[in-house]
Amino acid sequence: MSLLLAAESHPGFQDEYPIGPSSFEFKSLSDFTLFGLHVAVTRLVTMAFFATIVLCLFFLIALRKPKLVPGRTQFIAESIYGFVRDKIARDVMGPDGLRFASYLTCLFVFIFVLNLYEILPLAQAPVTGRIAYPAVLAIITWVLFITVGIKKQGLGTYFKGALFPPGVPKFLYILLTPIEFVSTFIFRPFTLAVRLFANMFAGHLLVLIFFSGALYMWSVGGLQLAFGSVAFLIGIVVTFFELLIISLQAYIFVTLTAVYVAESLADEH
């Protein structure tokens, strides 16, 4: 509150260092029409493409000529894959999960890097802080666990097991089936996307407030220099805390994806 009041007395500050939803609004670098759709290439889109290219090159270089005694790059790549394979795919999904380990690894590192932009110098904005990116990833998970379930059990058996749990009196299906449908096929992708988006949006806003507050108080001078230094130090602490959140959110998203696929692979629900 004190920062906002101070900003009102120093009107040029809010224009130079905006705090709020506008911090996630980026001007288009390029606009064009593709198949009748308007496409705008923003800084976040560029960052997402750059992350994709870097990750592809990293794994291609690391695993192009694998050695019995791995070098540093190969060791890092194998460690990431081994962690996701053993701690997520195998632990959550069992032996069947090993065939999904490569996808889950790609999903994990991709989300991690998109989150990591929040604290990287010059970038300083998580790509997943815009709901469109978590939403697309959640839709992919949604399509994956439905497709896997249909392939494993058959169309009718899968939806029957998902919507009509066995051992329940038939008259309760009138109430239970709509609840199962909403919770399984609507709330799952919705909560998956919103959880990632909300955490990254809130974290970025928190970091932005502390560092912007420090810049403002340093610009005022006087006793505000001391308060600005405190705000800056707190901002550094929050940044390191956000590094934990960045990793945790990538882990949670991938783990829940594995849980949903594991349920689709199960013979009974």
Image (tube, rainbow, N blue to C red):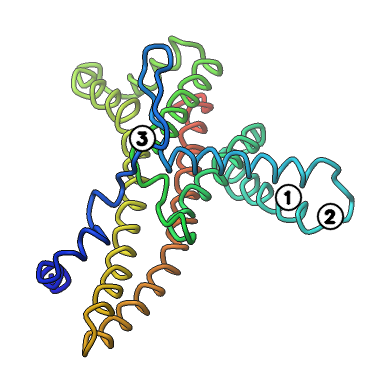
Tag 2 residue? 70
In the foreground, 146 or 39: 39
Task: Give the amino acid at mark 2.
Answer: Pro
Are there few (<14), some (14-19), or many (20+) residues within 10 Å of tag 2?
A: some
From what the image shows, is residue 189 above or below residue 163? below
The residue type indicated by label 3 comes to Ala
**Residue depth check, mark 1 versus mark 3: number of the one nearer the observer:** 3
Q: Position of residue 178 (x, y in %)?
A: 23, 21
Nearer to the camera, 121 or 237: 121
Numbered mark located on residue 78 in the image: 1
Q: Which residue is mark 3?
A: 132
Q: Are marks 1 and 2 in contact (CB under 8 Å)?
A: yes
Secondary structure under the numbered disc 1 in the rendered image: helix
- Quadrant (top left, top right, bottom left, bottom right) of the C terminus: top left
* In-front residue for pair 257/46: 46
Q: Seen in the image, is 249 located left or right of residue 3?
A: right
